[in-house]
Amino acid sequence: MSQFVMPSLGADMESAVLMEWRVKEGDRVSKGQVIAEVETSKGVIEIEVFEEGIVDKILVAEETECAVGTPLAIIRTETESSPKDETAQILTTEPQTAESPELANPPIPEASERIKASPAARRKAKEMGLELSALAVSGGEIHLAQLQSPPETAPKPIDGMRQAIARAMSRSNAEIPHYYLSTSINMTPALHWLEEENIKRSIKERLLAAALLIRAVTKALQEIPELNGFWKDDAPQISDAINPGIAIALRKGGLITPALMNTQEMNLDQTMRALDDLITRTRSGKLRNTEMTLQTITITNLGDLGVESVYGVIYPPQVAIVGLGRIMDAPWAEGDSLCIRKVMQVTLAGDHRATDGRTGALFLDTLNRILQNPQELL
Amino acid sequence: MTNEAIKRAIIDQILEIAPDIEEGDIIPDKNIQRSLEIDSFDFLKILTALNEVFGVEVPESDYAKVDTLEHMSEYFSERIKI
């Protein structure tokens, strides 16, 4: 028997609202399966279970606010028998409904009647005393945004997130002695290669520069692993897994940096697909707890907004943040001639407790070298 | 397909992919990506979805021709096979 508790989804989180159970008592669960959705200041997060077993008892009802560490359910391992509840045993012989966490569907007790609405919208409607049926549009799911149109009742949906960012960034600047390094990288070869590659591909398989850059950062980190990890207990800890936190801006304000997990195992196409999936889920509020907590470095790309360089603030306990600026046409000297190239300013902020500028310089140099040979990134 | 129908389909896809945008935010002659904060990922998603609807693929070299709602609907209306 073990307790499944409300996990901490970041050092700044104190509590979260359990929005929806994806399993019911008696269900068999496997390691990594999403079993619940919780709403935090960072949005709705899917919570995975870390062991195999059977859901013996659900301790907390949906839409309950729980402090971190609150037991939410009891998970029984398969070898343990449930003395009092034999139905649970019978239920476990049913075929498992969710092979992969991504395919898991929430149990829908009143399938035909139920109005599709995001958990956040459901909760908001309840707070506002609105009937979801009155808001339902034909065939569409009700989203939180639809409930925020009357200005007098609109709270400030990003306040919690703002607070969370404030706490983490204050801690970072108070504790982490940052050093900053920057270099200009000629992106013409990489972009040219990408263009040629995309001509060969259908629109569905097209690659974006962002994926290429993440792949390049991953390869550089494999050579310079000291920047990938944490500063914990007064010591650097290098992580084998490379889980870059990708800064994703939300259109309505705020920023989330969920982890793209294990990029060291992905080729370029897989990186593209995983990034696409991560961005979609971030914007629709469907992140997993591991993605919220296991970042080993951060990559921020404000280039879309036209800034030339980004001097980032490290997200503790990570030890580095890579800032990618706008790719712009700039004068570039090659041999004796002056030409125009696509140039990107890459910045590294490092934690000086964990690494020295030399490590950071090696990283930027390696990244530059990798981007000059883009065909190796496939 | 009429121009109006094409425009409607484009707007529908934008709203589908970026549900936090409201229809009134889409100004026909404004740059779609900049005015609506659509990043390169969402833009590619919109074009991929429109490829399903119209059967027309927009190559990257033509991105400058589909920068606004007006331009995008002209682009598709010239290329949709009747």
Image: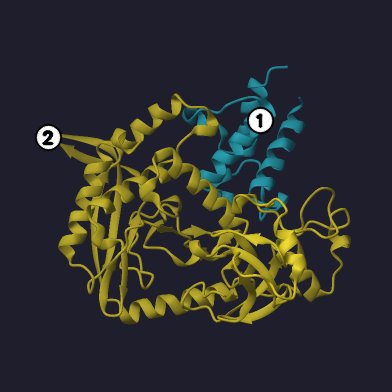
Chain colours: A yellow, B cyan
Q: Helix, strand, or loop for circle 2?
A: loop
The percent coordinates of residue B46 (x first, y second) are 61, 39
List the residue tagged with mark 2.
Answer: A335
Q: In this orientation, does residue A110 appear?
A: yes
**Residue type, mark 2 in image:** Gly
In the image, A112 versus A373, the foreground residue is A112
Q: In this orientation, does residue A149 appear?
A: no
Drawn side of residue B66 relative to residue A146, left or right? left
List the residue tagged with mark 1.
Answer: B52
Drawn side of residue A230 relative to residue A121, left or right? left
Q: Residue at x 77, y 66 (%)?
A: A87
**Residue type, mark 1 in image:** Glu
The Cα–Cα distance between marks 2 and 1, rounded to whole angstroms, is 47 Å
Residue A108 vertical placement versus B14 (above, below): below
Q: Helix, strand, or loop for circle 1?
A: helix
The percent coordinates of residue A60 (x first, y second) are 70, 77
Q: Residue at x 64, y 71 (%)?
A: A157
In the image, A151 versus A162, the foreground residue is A162
Query: Which of the 4 image quadrants contains residue A36?
Result: bottom right
